[in-house]
């Protein structure tokens, strides 16, 4: 049972250890993979996107309106080298995807320029929707 009188005693309150105030998290280092540079040319075809970390670097997962997407990985040890793989979404959740290796888009593409990333993503965004003719 709580003793409410202790809460009112200033001496007890002064002796109660105070937890440190959490420090705000530092901003995520963007590296060269800045979403606004990559996403602006693809904007009409994008349904959603998100940025996340993975062991050894960061990723951007893009979902296009056609049901496909791209996962773009940047690795700090290989500065300026990006890995792009096509995805196929099968549900509404951001993680409801699988790698898609059954199209003319290469399974895995290594790029060193944002223009190359945009080109591969544009190819993915133009795939016929799953089940489409």
Image (tube, rainbow, N blue to C red):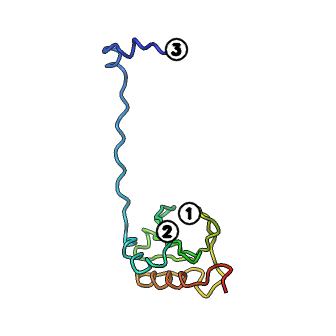
Q: Badge 2: few (under 14), some or many (20 or more) residues near its Cα, within 10 Å? A: few
Q: Using the image, determine if residue 102 lies above or below residue 99.
A: below
The picture places residue 15, in percent across and down from the top left corner, at: 34, 19
Marked residue nearer the N-terminal end (1 or 2) = 2
Q: Is residue 132 left or right of residue 53?
A: right
Q: Badge 1: few (under 14), some or many (20 or more) residues near its Cα, within 10 Å? A: some
The picture places residue 50, in percent across and down from the top left corner, at: 47, 65
* Dots 2, 3 in contact, CB < 8 A: no
Q: Secondary structure at mark 1?
A: loop
Q: Secondary structure at mark 2?
A: strand
Q: Residue at x 66, y 83 (%)?
A: 132
How many numbered circles does the render carry?
3
Q: Secondary structure at mark 3?
A: loop
Q: CA distance from mark 1 to mark 2?
A: 9 Å
Marked residue nearer the N-terminal end (2 or 3) = 3
Q: Residue at x 61, y 84 (%)?
A: 128
Q: Residue at x 40, y 81 (%)?
A: 41
Q: What residue would you read off at disc 1?
A: 94
Q: Is residue 129 left or right of residue 10?
A: right
Tell which tag, 2 or 3, sits nearer the viewer.
Answer: 2
Q: Using the image, determine if residue 40 lies above or below residue 54.
A: below
Which label belongs to residue 107?
A: none
Q: What residue would you read off at disc 2?
A: 48
Q: Using the image, determine if residue 3 lies above or below residue 80.
A: above
The picture places residue 80, in percent across and down from the top left corner, at: 40, 76
Which quarter of the figure is the C terminus placed in?
bottom right
Marked residue nearer the N-terminal end (3 or 1) = 3
Q: CA distance from mark 2 to mark 3?
A: 50 Å
* Dots 1, 2 in contact, CB < 8 A: yes
The picture places residue 110, in percent across and down from the top left corner, at: 50, 81
Q: What residue would you read off at disc 3?
A: 1
């Amino acid at each position: 049972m709580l003793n409410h009188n202790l809460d009112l005693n200033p001496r007890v309150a002064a002796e109660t250890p105070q937890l440190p105030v959490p420090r705000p998290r530092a901003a995520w280092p963007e590296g060269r993979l800045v979403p606004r540079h990559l996403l602006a040319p693809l904007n009409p075809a994008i349904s959603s996107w998100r940025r996340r970390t993975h062991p050894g670097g960061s990723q951007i997962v893009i979902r296009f309106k056609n049901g496909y997407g791209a996962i773009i990985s940047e690795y700090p040890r290989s500065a300026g080298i990006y890995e792009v793989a096509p995805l196929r979404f099968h549900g509404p959740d951001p993680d409801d995807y699988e790698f898609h290796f059954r199209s003319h888009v290469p399974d895995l593409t290594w790029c060193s320029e944002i223009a190359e990333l945009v080109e591969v993503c544009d190819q993915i965004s133009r795939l016929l929707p799953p089940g489409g003719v």
